[in-house]
Amino acid sequence: MVGPVVNVAAVQAAPVYLDRDATIRKSVELVHEASSGGAQLIAFPETFVAGYPSWADFTAASTFDDPQQKAAFSRYLDSAVVIERGDLNPVVTAAAETGAFVYLGVVERSVSGGSVYCTLVAIDPEAGIVGVHRKLKPTYGERLMWADGDGHGLRAHEFAGTRLSGLNCWENWMPLARAAMYAQGPEIHVATWPGSPAVSHDISRFVAMEGRLFVVSSGAVLRNEHIPDDFPVRDEMIEAHHRYASGGSIIVDPEGNVLAEADKHAECIIHAECDLDLVRQARHNFDPTGHYSRPDVLQLSVDRKRRDPATFED
């Protein structure tokens, strides 16, 4: 039996680095390109708009009160997305025009204006933005750049007869974060990455087999030529490295079989068809939050309240 089939796409591309509006325009073009190839679900890399803070790993980013590092962070703040301002409206429109569900990684500016989150935005073609998930725990050098998120966005979404979920980067390595998503019954899971096959490939196959679902992993590309000439720590970055992200985009079925894989360093879009009947078949012998769970012994409590810094009562 062939069940409902969803055509998915993982975008592997370089942002217009630290240029929010230009990267949003590029995102719109890529949504239309992926849709023209038949994609109903389109996944972008982690913090695609407007770039991953690679200098945290390739410069002296932890030097306290360093003028160049402060200037670099200020530039990063200026390039961040303010969702309430409507920055993502062009992508919302592109989703509506194409009928595609879009997972877009963005750098989201906080209400304070002085911090940013690594955020995964879920965009439904009819309802618009239906999910804003801020990464629970930034990893290693990211902690110099990103604030901690909360559980508000740990939600699955209904689309095209299936349920979708999504997590940022190493959240996919967090057992309880995965369990929180599995418990909502997703059949296709989106994993976003800054662009590292060595990190994304193994866990993508593991999540697919553990969750008995399809996994669409999308990673970015970033090289020296993408770094603006006037970026304050550009010279330090170039001295240390020349390729900061190499992609690693991959699509995997519920048994861990690779359906599509992007070439390293290539800007491209990979596609695959997800026959949802394979999910049901795979869960015949293992359903991690269904018949193979023991809620009488093991329980997970998830706090999905948005954690704002202050509550005002007027």
Image (cartoon, rainbow, N blue to C red):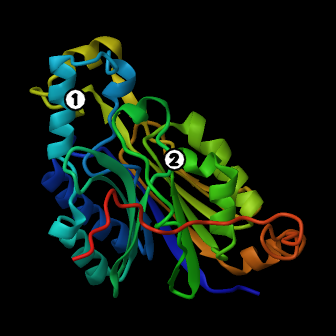
Q: Position of residue 193 (x, y in %)?
A: 47, 46
Query: Upstream in the sequence, badge 2 or badge 1?
Result: 2
Q: At which x and y percent is residue 301?
A: 67, 66
For marks 2 and 1, give the one nearer the viewer: 2
Q: Residue at x 30, y 15 (%)?
A: 63
Indicate the secondary structure of the residue bearing disc 2: helix
Q: Which mark is residue 302?
A: none
* Furthest residue toward front: 314
Label 1 CA crowd tier, 10 Å (few <14, some 14–19, many 20+): few
Callout 2 amino acid? Cys
Q: Taking 39 as reference, is 303 left or right?
A: right
Q: Position of residue 9 (x, y in %)?
A: 46, 64
Residue 281: image location, x then y, percent: 81, 77
Image point (47%, 66%), residue name: 153
Numbered disc 1: secondary structure: helix
Q: Nearer the viewer, residue 57 or 252?
A: 57
Residue 111, quarter of the rendered image:
bottom left
Circle 2 residue: 169
- The crowd level at tag 2 (other Cα within 10 Å; few <14, some 14-19, many 20+) is many
* In the depicted structure, whether residue 38 falls above or below residue 53: below
- Residue pointed to by mark 1: 225
Amino acid at circle 1:
Glu
**Alpha-carbon distance for marks 2 and 1?**
24 Å
Classify residue 161 by image quadrant.
bottom right
Whether residue 309 sits left or right of residue 172 in the image: it is left
Residue 283 at least partly seen: yes
Quarter location, residue 298: bottom right
Query: What is the quadrant of the C terminus in the image?
Result: bottom left
The answer to whether any part of residue 258 appears in the image is no
Q: How many circles with numbers are drawn on the protein? A: 2
When the figure is inspected, residue 61 is found, relative to residue 90, above or below; the finding is: above
Q: Residue at x 19, y 50 (%)?
A: 113
